[in-house]
Image: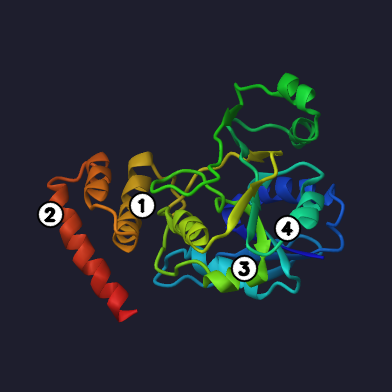
Amino acid sequence: MLSIFIMYSTDRFEALDYTISCLKDMKLYKESQKTLVVDGKIDKIPKNWEVVQVPRFNNKFCWAKMWDAGVLTSQNEKIVYLDSDRLLPSNFLELIYENLEDNLFLFTSFHFMMQQKISLEKCKKILNSSTEQFKEELDLSFLRYEPIQAEPFHGSGKNVMSGCTAFTRKTYLKLGGVDHWYCGHGAFADSDFHMQAASAGCEFVDLQIPQIHFIHKKLDNNQNSLKDKDLWLLSLENFIYYCQKWKLPMALAESMAVRCDIKNPHSYISKKLKQIMADAKEC
């Protein structure tokens, strides 16, 4: 059977409600182990779901620790990882169960970002339509197509590990899990793990079914919405580490620093890199 774990922050309860409602329509849902991996405390626990709370370190969210908690508490070999804002068609779990093997990651590239709130009923109708019906139902005024890339690449963007994928416990443990260095809202933990899996010879299989990414805002520790520039700045430190780890030219990080309006990006990156390497050595 399957173990499903959903990575959840408590500011996204409505998105979680949509996600679980879609899961309930699927065969294998009832029999599957269901775990919420929670960043912090939780007030409302969905029926028949277990909860694993992952404390923050230095008040920073750690994507890798969330993954570890989901995988290491899984009772089944076949594991489905979802963010709490991913809506999928009713055949999703069956496709996972039928196609998942060791050294594979199953995902779908057919990813649509919600631009304005859509009713749950409308979402389900779109997701479960035939190909032709899907094209007719699709309204690009409230959905934006953002394809997920099957092959790893050195940059930010949606990839196989971004919020919806399936793999075996054996494969995850063989890869050593996600790098714990990456913290905070900053990206690249998923990019890093994607690159790590590819380097180890894993394959990425596209199920070619639609998924809808529920609309939400990214918030800081005070529950204020983060602006794009703020998100770039949070990502920058992670990207400096990523460039060092994968032996990429630091000019790439300097280019990101320019987008963040950092004066003298070369000096800034050099100083940050020394700090990062000192921190990594201590770890």
Task: First in sequence, mark 1 or 4: give its number.
Answer: 4
Percent of width and height locating residue 8: 61, 58
At horizontal 39% and vertical 71% (from top left) the residue drawn is 58
Percent of width and height locating residue 260: 26, 43
> In which quadrant of the rendered image does the N terminus lie?
bottom right
Q: Residues within 10 Å of mark 1 (few under 14, many from 20)?
A: many
Specify the quadrant of the image occupied by residue 203: bottom right
Q: Is residue 237 left or right of residue 149?
A: left
Residue type, mark 4 in image:
Leu
At horizontal 62% and vertical 68% (from top left) the residue drawn is 171
Task: First in sequence, mark 3 or 1: give its number.
Answer: 3
Q: Residues within 10 Å of mark 2 (few under 14, many from 20)?
A: few
The circle on residue 171 is 3
Task: First in sequence, mark 4 or 3: give its number.
Answer: 4
Return the residue at label 1.
Answer: 235
Q: CA distance from mark 1 to mark 4?
A: 32 Å
Residue type, mark 3 in image:
Thr
At horizontal 23% and vertical 53% (from top left) the residue drawn is 250
| Visible residue check, residue 221 | no
Q: Is residue 270 left or right of residue 106?
A: left
Q: Residues within 10 Å of mark 3 (few under 14, many from 20)?
A: many
Q: Are marks 3 and 1 in contact (CB under 8 Å)?
A: no
Q: Are marks 2 and 4 in contact (CB under 8 Å)?
A: no
Q: CA distance from mark 3 to mark 1?
A: 27 Å
Task: First in sequence, mark 1 or 2: give its number.
Answer: 1
Helix, strand or loop status at disc 3 = helix
Q: Is residue 276 left or right of residue 188?
A: left
Percent of width and height locating residue 230: 34, 46
Return the residue at label 4.
Answer: 100
